Amino acid sequence: MRPRLLLLDGHSLAYRAFYALKDANLMTTDGQPTAAVYGFTSMLTNMIRDEQPTHIAVCFDRSEPTFRHETYGEYKANRSATPDEFRDQMRLIFELLDILHVPYLSKPGFEADDLIATLATQAAAADMDVLIVTGDRDALQLVNERITVLMTRRGISDMTRFTPDAVFEKYELTPQQYPDFAALRGDPSDNLLSIPGVGEKTAAKWVRDFGSLTALVDRVDEVKGKVGEKLRDHLDQVLMNRRLTELLRDVPMDVAIDELKQGQWQREEINKLFDSLQIRGELRERVFKVLGTGEADPEQGFEVETVILGPGRVAGWLSALPEGRAGLAFKGAYGSGTGRIDAIAVASPDGTAAHIDPVKLTEDDFTALATWLASDAPKAVHDAKGPMLALWTMGMELGGLSCDTALAAYLAMPGQRTFDLEDLARRYVNRDLRAETESSGQAALFGDDEDAPAKDLALRAAAVRELADALEDFLGERGGTNLLGVVELPLLRVLAEMERAGIAVDRAYLSGMEAQFAAGVKQAVEEAHRVVGEQFNLGSPKQLQEIFFTKLGLPKTKKTKTGYSTDAEQLAWLATQTDHELPVIMLRHRDQQKLMTTVTGLLAEISDDGRIHTTFNQIVAATGRLSSEKPNLQNIPIRTAEGRRIRQGFTVGSGFDTLLTADYSQIELRIMAHLSEDRSLIEAFASGHDFHQATASRVFDIPPEQVDGELRAKIKAMNYGLAYGLSDFGLAGQLNIPVAEARALKDEYFEEFGGVRDFLQAIVQQARTDGYTETIMGRRRYLPDLTSDNRQRREMAERMALNAPIQGSAADIIKVAMLNVRQALGEAGLASRMILQVHDELVFEVAAGELEALTALVREQMAQAYPLRVPLEVSVGVGRTWEDAGH
């Protein structure tokens, strides 16, 4: 096959991707826009997939003026400034090309089009086929039998293929005539002026009739009428257009065509980039599928011999399993309080894997399977909590869990957004999730084989087994082995027990609250319509902007891409700037809407047993904190009276006397004192005074009893803010004071607590050196943006570096506390149980007669979870509802 050179106009494609995906609002959680790099990656991958080039290069424009600017000072002068969000993504595109080892070129004084024209000419002369991907029609002049132009039309996937015949079909001109036509037509995008009154049809007709621009100029007097006069009047402009439109085909190049081959690249490098940009799912899969590993050793599948065990065969197969860790995969439906198992696959260390249908088991088979699953025989599972819950519904236990590959991957790379088995297999063992003898993906794994589902599950079990070994090695290098074995794996069972238990809910009470909040929403809508004098959609930012700033003429708020902001912060500001009722009504409307949505979501999650069984997530928050979903119990507001009323709907369940809540008092500040070893901060805790009062006393050098509410509030904001990387500007906003005053307050604070200042500075510096932060138990968070050239991303990473060791250490401590409490409950033989964890709070259902014993047990185990220089302090509350048990 003839070699093929793929040439891409880098800036043209990146701009197209940027604007095509702008409305998608692609952005990382720390504010880095990614639309341009996402779209560019997609286009590049599609071009390589569809065109199968043997050689490739991406050409870019430069910021310096070119010879065209020297010829015509107004060249491209009409173009608007490059958006900051786009400019910031160009370095990411260059980083992507570096990682993929795709050659990219630019040259001072020349445009990308000139480099493309030169390389295309050289390649065609060397008997290569050339494909040019661009959005610039000037490239059509290059088209010939060897050179084809792929012109972007709409979005990032719609292309028109221009061969010589296609150019003639569209313009009735040859490619050689195209620059003459373009000179007569003008080009607004390059600020090349057109002839007044002369459009594309006239320009094309002149070139067809006269054959070329040169001939037209020679016989210009033959063009009659007003258009002829206009042509003659603007002939100098047309000739200059022609000089500027002509692409140079002899730019001195620093690279030879033979060097334009994609080099070998490493999967882990693209994974790291995509992790940092939070690019996941289909695009990542497509990149790997199209481009392969880039490594010398091609991707392979997994070697596995599948045995489908029918009735009567399970006990014998399990009894013959060799020593070593087995991999497990389950097929079924999993819920927080229930679940079912439809199939189980067990991958043996000897390379075979068995598929078991639990519905078809004999009694002996079921007993043998249950015994083996519950045994200490080492097992690896991917995302084990769901299967564990489902097995319980079948009367089975899962013991011997030595590795959960999802948890291990999370500890190894906590910033990753997903932990799919397929992706992890490719990443850590360089294997596709397919049989090694197959060349296609999993979808076509076993074709029409009736045993395909069984073989597929067996393959997943084999992948889990092999992946577990690789992840444990990788995790060992990163210091996470102890966290996995001592904290996260044991916590799986504790969380599963809590999910299965759930918490009782008063359905009637919540339904009444839903109706009240709905009435509040309706009332706010009616009031808003009344004060404005017309009906409008309170949920439409566009209509709100029209009402607030055009009709009512209220003060302008913060400017955004879509107009002046009407978010809650800006509405609160507006309420202080005007006497008009609407901002206050809108704030009340949003508050009532949010509360109604929260209660509606809770009602939808009540199970048949009258309890809510939330799902706890261990692998979501990069800091190590647990989160919950279906419903998210961390979303229930507790800072307002109406929000706290929602907690009143969570009650003690049948068979228990009361609820008990326990949480840590100021745990993050205690961790700050422990890590910083600041003597003044430690003494403030030991003083016996209210902590914020004590620290305010030191900062302002006054007796504790003279610290008023305002001074205490300032220091409280400082105490907590420093643990979250609070800036001068952020502190000023919290306290509603000038930035200079906030800066002075921080200086006063650090004058008293110098150890805190030194600690915070050292955290960032150490993280910049190491590339990660670490908690008291060795939980790492990797922050590559600490060395970013982008100030916004770098400062965001610095704030994360300040926060992660403190918040992550708090997460470690509460997890250890949960494990210790659960073990102590069992050893004490108490019937009381732990049912919820939200932030730093644990919630228990207390059995009759056990309140005193449970309170003492919980206080002791939580306080002893980790030895800090400032002892952990536990607050406890008791009541029939979650709110009543608050403290």
Image (spheres, rainbow, N blue to C red):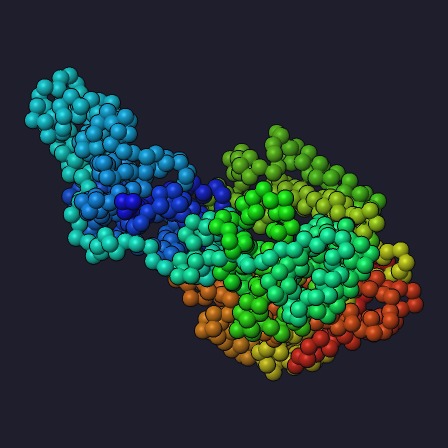
Q: Is residue 37 left or right of residue 690?
A: left
Q: In this view, does 672 lie to the left or right of 366?
A: left
- Which image quarter holds the C terminus? bottom right
- The structure residue drawn at horizontal position 33% and vertical position 55%, both measured from the top left corner, is 262
* Front residue (pair 301, 239): 301
* Front residue (pair 287, 362): 362
* Front residue (pair 49, 497): 49
Do we see residue 687 in this rendering? yes
- The picture places residue 462, in percent across and down from the top left corner, at 60, 60
Q: Is residue 218 left or right of residue 94?
A: left
- The structure residue drawn at horizontal position 74% and vertical position 57%, both measured from the top left corner, is 313
Give the vertical position of 670 relative to 207 (above or below). below
Q: Please identify the residue farthest to the left as the structure is shown.
A: 218
- The picture places residue 820, in percent across and down from the top left corner, at 75, 73
* Front residue (pair 297, 397): 297
- Which image quarter holds the N terminus? top left
Do we see residue 275 in this rendering? no
- The picture places residue 637, in percent across and down from the top left corner, at 70, 54
